[in-house]
Amino acid sequence: MIRYFIKQNWYRYLIGILFLISVDALMLITPRIMGSIVDELRSGVQDIEYIGLLILAVIGVALGLFITRLFWRVFIMGSARRFEYYARKTLFQKLLDLPPTFYDKTRVGDLMARFTNDVNAVRMAMGPAIVMTIDSIFLISVTIIAMGSFTSWKLTWIAIIPLPLLAVVSTFFGRIIHKRFKRVQAAFSNLTDTVEESISGARLIKSYGIEGLRNDTLNEKSDNYVQENIKLIKVWGMFFPLIQMLSMLGSVLATFFGGQMVVLGQLTLGEYVTFTSYLGMLIWPMTAFGWVINMVQRGRASYKRLMEVLEEKNNIVVEDPVSLEDFNGHILLKNLTFTYPTGNRPVLRDIDFELNPGTKVAIVGTTGSGKSTLAKLIARLYPIEKGMLFIDGYDINRLPPEVIREKIAYVPQETFLFSETIRNNIRFGNMELTDSEVEKYASIASIHEDIISFPEGYDTLVGERGVTLSGGQKQRVAIARALIKQTPIIVLDDCLSAVDTETEKKILDSLKDSQGKHSIVVVSHRLKAVVDADMIYVMHEGRIVERGKHHDLIGNGGLYQRMYERQMIEEKLKED
Ligand SMILES: Nc1ncnc2c1ncn2[C@@H]1O[C@H](COP(=O)(O)OP(=O)(O)OP(=O)(O)O)[C@@H](O)[C@H]1O
């Protein structure tokens, strides 16, 4: 990523660096002029015009510094900001590309930290660190040469004795700082995770009255973050004074030996003033040396974390792709066994399943038996080994994800609505869809009446995660969103759990009528809603234990019959 960015922006850096070097060169002129003024003043001012000229030169240098400083900042810091923009954009595009398996194993807080802290740390290495490196190398070497040639080499060597010590100290501290900084970042990630979860789950926390408990968790994480930061501050606290002390040591040596040389007449007072000014100019680049080490180390660590995400493989690999032009909609699962990439045991075993075009197939069963997993696999949200899942006779591994998205719409168990209008949530980026189309599919999903009863109808804004809508309303909006894609196959993954049985049945019936020859796979807990399915698969502990139509299953004394009878009794009890 950096290589590509530098390739595109190298000239900006080059121009910036040239300006920066000009600043450093200009800075060397002022002490020399000041020295000459002091000597002129000491010798009783022979030529007042000469002094005037020197003062004009100082003003000229200051003006030059103003311009060159402005430009290096624009070019170098500007490029670093461009990098920040580019890195965030690249990272975001990658995140949109990554499969669900990535999100199963990655925490939101961790990703947010990469977006904020890590991108920032790399920006610092791409901007300020470059400036400081050039300042350190150029200013230190040129200043030392200027000190030696304009004043005294002997005094220069004496005054810069503490320099190597500075390098040792900054390298040593840089390493510790880096380690502690990593711990601070981890603590920050933990903290943001907790805040995120607490805000998302605020209603749940309130309904259980566990505010105190959440508060304690947050306090613990906050405290951990503060403690880690204090540890970091302690090292910084030692590092800076030590750097300054060593720098000051140079000044003490210069005053002691330089003063003697002035007294002995080996150095003019003006030369001594020039020398101490130069020495003062060395303190910043020397200190910057330590900063640079730290910044580059932070930048490197953060860059590694960014690259970890960018190098993450999209584990859905398409070999020998087919485009499915004449799509039929036949799905076949043969002896499928599946383990989640993050799991350690199969959650589906020996699954044989078939969906014929234009039929409605239901997946029912006990909780945790693998119904949703099966639905997700049909929608190809997880990678599957070859030879297990076929669409129109083609192995699913030969179908690119975009082809599958065109053919199969999947409505997940948990609905997510964006903070947009209901209309936009239904048409979901496809702005070509007319209002009447949006309304047609909202009607099929039995949500149209609810929407028009809102004061702003389809233009009603849905709050963060749809807080203004009820659970059942959100689910129906999500179904309308899937239906509007008009895919030949629609997979409903227990996405009607928040509506009553009658409404669920009504939606499924109108869906069947409207979809015509299209196929529906529906995962449901309510058997009554799927009694008319062309085929019902009954799952238990990762296996299909029964299959058939309702009337085949209801009389065989198996799991389906037991579940159905239990649900009927529960319903009757509710009615009574
Ligand atoms: N992303 C995941 N990573 C690892 N394991 C998972 C994942 N999602 C589900 N599982 C596991 O897979 C098993 C089946 O879960 P699944 O959600 O498919 O069951 P289900 O029949 O739909 O359950 P329910 O009726 O409760 O919704 C469970 O043991 C669950 O813990």
Image (tube, grey):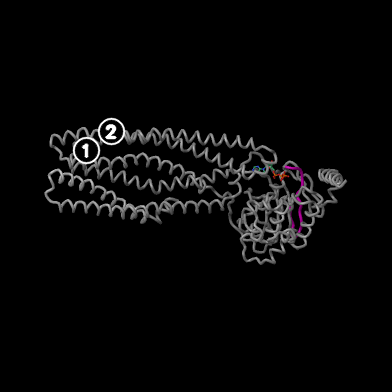
Q: Is residue 396 magenta?
A: no
| Cα distance in 3D space between marks 1 and 2 | 13 Å
**Which amino acid type corresponds to the residue marked 2 in the rendered image?**
Leu
Q: Circle 2 sits in a helix, a strand or a loop, which is it?
A: helix
Q: Residue drawn 76% across and 43% down? A: 366
Q: Quadrant of residue 321?
A: bottom right
Percent x, y of residue 255: 22, 34
| Mark 1 CB within 8 Å of ligand 1 | no
The residue mark sitting in front, 1 or 2, is 2
Q: Which of 265 and 344 is in front in this view?
A: 265
Instruction: State the residue in front, 309 or 547.
Output: 309
Which amino acid type is marked by label 1? Answer: Thr
Residue 144 vs 461, above or below: the answer is: above
Q: Would you say 221 lies left or right of 141 here?
A: right
The mark that comes first in sequence, 1 or 2, is: 1
Would you say the beta carbon of the disc 2 residue lies within 8 angstroms of ligand 1?
A: no
Residue drawn where x is 42% and y is 36% of the image: 177
Q: Do the residues labelled 1 and 2 touch (CB within 8 Å)?
A: no
> Can you identify the residue that label 1 sits on?
156
Q: What stretch is highlighted in magenta?
A: 354-367
- The x and y percentages for residue 65 are 29, 52
Give SS at disc 1. Answer: helix
Give above or below for 214 relative to 404. above
Instruction: List x then y, in percent, for residue 573.
Output: 86, 44
What's the mark number on residue 249? 2
Q: Which mark is residue 67?
A: none
Question: Dividing the image into four equal quarters, which quarter contains ligand 1?
Answer: top right
Give the x, y percent position of residue 421: 64, 59
Classify residue 101 as left or right of residue 118: right
Horizontal arrangement in the rendering, residue 137 relative to residue 182 (left or right)? left
